[in-house]
Structures are given as structure tokens and as C-alpha cells.
Image: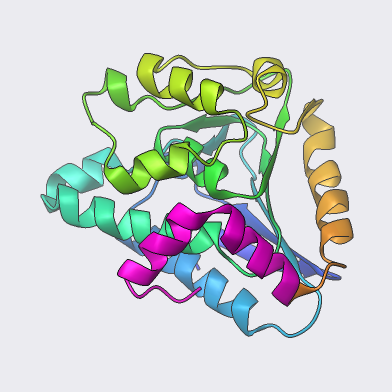
Amino acid sequence: MSTMTLEQQGSVFVLTLRNGANGNTLNDAVLAEYHAVMDQIQAHKGEAALVITSDDPKCFSNGIDLPWLMQSGDLMGFVQRMEDMLVRLSLLNVPVIAAINGNAYAGGALLATVCDFRLMRADKGRFCYSEVKVKMAFTPALLDIVRLLPSQGAGFELALTGNAWGGEECARREVVSQALPGEAVLPAAINLAQDLATRDRATYAAIKKGLKPSMARWAKERSLTV
């Protein structure tokens, strides 16, 4: 993989995004890497959990690779492929935790949203659904992803304003579980993942699917492997 690495620490898989120079943005090659990671984790037997983070202290993910997308000319096709990856990640049959150590904008915020839990650094970085400011309306599937946030009011406000919230505001508004010092985010996420990995995978996955009926519907409609 060229834009991310997957390492296993006991029962925890740590997916580190390593394309910070390009904002850890999403294009077809990156989506393929996410699918490969999910294939590997789904094939793993035994206890497991996934933590997603970035090695760039300023950037978790800035969403779609817009220069690439403009060159490809396949906006709606790519958006659907991105949706498929996000839906699949949302239902992955292990606990998934986002360690948000920098900016999570647009598609990057949606990536964090589909994770089961989010931890964020308090001092730097912003969480933002910027679509309204760049004149890109949410598709029905992406709106269902926004609705996955524990606080419906926060998701409503973020989607309609396009405002960027820091970690402390995100924690106060229940967008993330905790806002922590930068150096504490990844260790805390790994500790949470280690604890959650002890849950029975089949039971955890069944409960997750029940809590995310819209994602289960999209996965069934598009015949996604979950």
C-alpha cells in the first residue's frame, strides 16, 4: 500500500494514513487500499479491533482528492464508490476507532463519522462537513452517514453551517467521545480498542448492524461485503 500502512499490535490493527502531504485525500487508488485493509481484517480470526490515525500532526484527512477528481471527470461515479467504502467500514465486523490527530474535513469527517468511536486532539485540528461551503450537496447515503453521529443536533448544525469545530467543542457536543492532548490520542484509542477487542466479534457486529440500520440497508442494496 502506498498511502497507508497496517500494523498489528496484539489484537489491535492500527491503520496509519501516510499521505499527509496530499491531505490523506480520497481517490480510487486510496479506496482500493481501504478495501484491502478491510478484506485483511475480515479474514483475521480471533479477537480484533481497528484504530485509524494519521502520521501527519496537522491532518487526519481532507476528504476527496479534488484535483484528481476534476481530471477524472467521474464525480458521481466516484462519490458512489466512496459511499460504498464508507458504508462497508461503518459495518466492519470489529470495533473501529478514529484517532483524529488533525483536521478532518468533508470526506475526512465522514470517514471519522463511520467509525464506532472517535477520539480527537484538543489543541489543534478541526472537524468539519464543508460540503455546503463548496457547493456539494450530500447524497442520500452521505446524509445517512452524517446521521450516525451520536448527537443528531450536532450533525444537523455541522452539515448546514459548514463550520469547523475543534476537539473540545466536538467533545462537548458529543461528536467525539474525548478530546485529549495530541500525544495522548493514539494511546487512548489503542487502549479503547484493546478493551473492545475482547467482545465477541459476531455479537458486536450484530449489535452494530442493528444500531446502523441505514448502513445495513445501503450495504444490502449495493451487495457490499460486510
Q: From what the image shows, is residue 225 above or below residue 24?
A: below
The span picked out in magenta is 202-226
Residue 127 in sight from this viewpoint:
no
Give the image location of residue 175, x and y in percent. 63, 29
Q: From what the image shows, is residue 8 above or below residue 46?
A: above
Say if the magenta span includes residue 210: yes
Give the image location of residue 194, x and y in percent. 86, 60
Give the side of residue 27 with respect to residue 100, left or right.
left
Give the side of residue 101 with respect to residue 221, left or right.
right
Which quarter of the figure has residue 176? top right
Say if the magenta span includes residue 37: no
Give the side of residue 218 with respect to residue 152, left or right.
left
Residue at screen point 84% across, 35% down: 184
Q: From what the image shows, is residue 108 above or below residue 27?
A: above
Give the image location of residue 136, x and y in percent. 23, 30
Which quarter of the figure has residue 125? top right
Residue at screen point 45% across, 37% down: 146
For the stretch drawn in magenta, what is the main secondary structure? helix
Foreground pick, 195 / 211? 211
Give the side of residue 9 with respect to residue 170, left or right.
right
Q: From what the image shows, is residue 226 above or below residue 152?
A: below
Residue 106 in sight from this viewpoint:
yes
Give the image location of residue 217, x and y in percent. 40, 62
Foreground pick, 167 / 181? 167
Residue at screen point 40% across, 24% down: 159
